[in-house]
Image: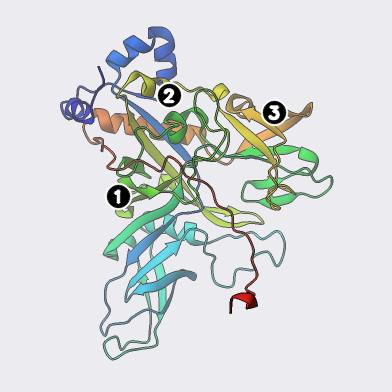
Amino acid sequence: MPKTYREINEKIKKGQAVVVTAEEIIDIVEKEGIDEAYKNIDVVTTATFGIMCSSGCFLNFGHTRPKIRMSEAWLNDVRIYTGIAAVDAYLGATELQHNDPENRYFPGEFKYGGGHVIEDLVSKKDIQLFALSYGTDDYTRRDLRTMININSLNQATMVNPRNCYQNYNVAVNAHKERTIYTYMGPLKPNMQNATYSSAGQLSPLLNDPLCKTIGIGTKVWLAGAHGHIYSQGTQHTTDCKRTKNNVPEEGAATLALTADMKHMDSEYVRGASIKGYGASLALGIGIPIPILDKEILKSTCIKDEDIYAPVIDYSKDYPKRLSNTIAKVNYKQLKSGKIKINNKKVKTSSMSSYPKAKKIASILKKEIQDTKFTLNEPYEKLPENQPFNQLEIRDNKRDDKKQ
């Protein structure tokens, strides 16, 4: 018989729910079989920790006396977007500090940016706010400089347009001589190294490949705070190649997440400096999967060796948007430290942290066991037939024949 969210939540509230991580469920099913495991297991916890550029936060500073309607503003000299309302602003993770040399002295260091400000806010550090205004009759103040921290803000809400990519590229550099600097880290010439970015068998969307339980309204663990999925993530697509167990072999679904930063833990919110590329933010995310039926349980048994990712040349094919795949490798191979491409052994490294993901899955497991975290049934599924559009360059010439 299928289980329901209500039944599972009742067991959670009574402290009776059986919860395991996506790593633990693999051994349990191998020993007990699907039927027996389905009888016993209620929830499987998944997690990931890695760099997620498409992240940021809405902030409300409160009103000064006299009031100001901010038209430009900076936090620790990192510009924030103020085109919303008087003292509301949005801080993006990849925004750079004022006067950062960027890549003028290549490769740039990008030592401080939006992601670092977000980490400092969550760490409860004091941050300088500087703001300018053109002045109005009702908002007469034209400038301010003060110190703020997260406790002095009315709201600090993380609102991320794209997190938790469902699988991702393995990046290499096929150029014969030059090291290149990318958001996937430095890549040495002649494919001397490869980088990847996924928790593999622990990753949320790889454990629910058809998004049967992960949808809009799903409750998530976002850097220690309890949040939810508010939309499909940007660049979300279902138009992808899949293995026989429905797992995408390339980037596919994404999630838009939100949570209250005042409840976050700075261990799972880390500003990142990516040499030659820019500033960003590393986040820890956990998502519970209710075991409603045996098919959902089977999906959570996915192993690293069953998840394949495409190897892409970031020196030519990626920047030119050429649809070439050098090879496909699985996450067991990637995590071993070496993969083989065209009979050549290539060292691998990860842009995400599997140990941190493992820790998050265990934390979420304990929160559910301790009745501190219940499940939300999605009120809407993520789009199931979603293409991925590219931006084509067009000129703006008018067709005189239509005039």
Viewer-nearest of labels 1 and 3? 3
**Numbered tag placed on residue 339 in the rendering:** 3
Q: Is disc 3 placed on a helix, strand or loop?
A: strand
Instruction: Name the residue that disc number 2 marks.
Output: 299
| Whether label 3 touches label 2, CB < 8 Å | no
- The residue that appears at 28% across and 33% down in the rendered structure is 367
Position of the C terminus by quadrant? bottom right
Residue 300 visible in the shown view: no
Instruction: Say left or right for 35 vs 399.
Output: left
Instruction: Say left or right for 308 vs 255.
Output: right
How far apart marks 1 and 3 lie (CA) works out to: 40 Å
Q: Nearer the viewer, residue 238 or 261?
A: 238
Colouring rule applied to residues? rainbow
Q: Residue 292's spot in the image, x, y percent? A: 29, 24
How far apart marks 3 and 2 lie (CA) works out to: 26 Å
Instruction: Name the residue that disc number 1 marks.
Output: 263
| Whether label 1 touches label 3, CB < 8 Å | no
Position of the N terminus by quadrant? top left
> Which picture quadrant has residue 42?
top left
- For mark 3, does the 10 Å Cα neighbourhood hold few (<14), some (14 to 19), or many (20 or more) residues? many
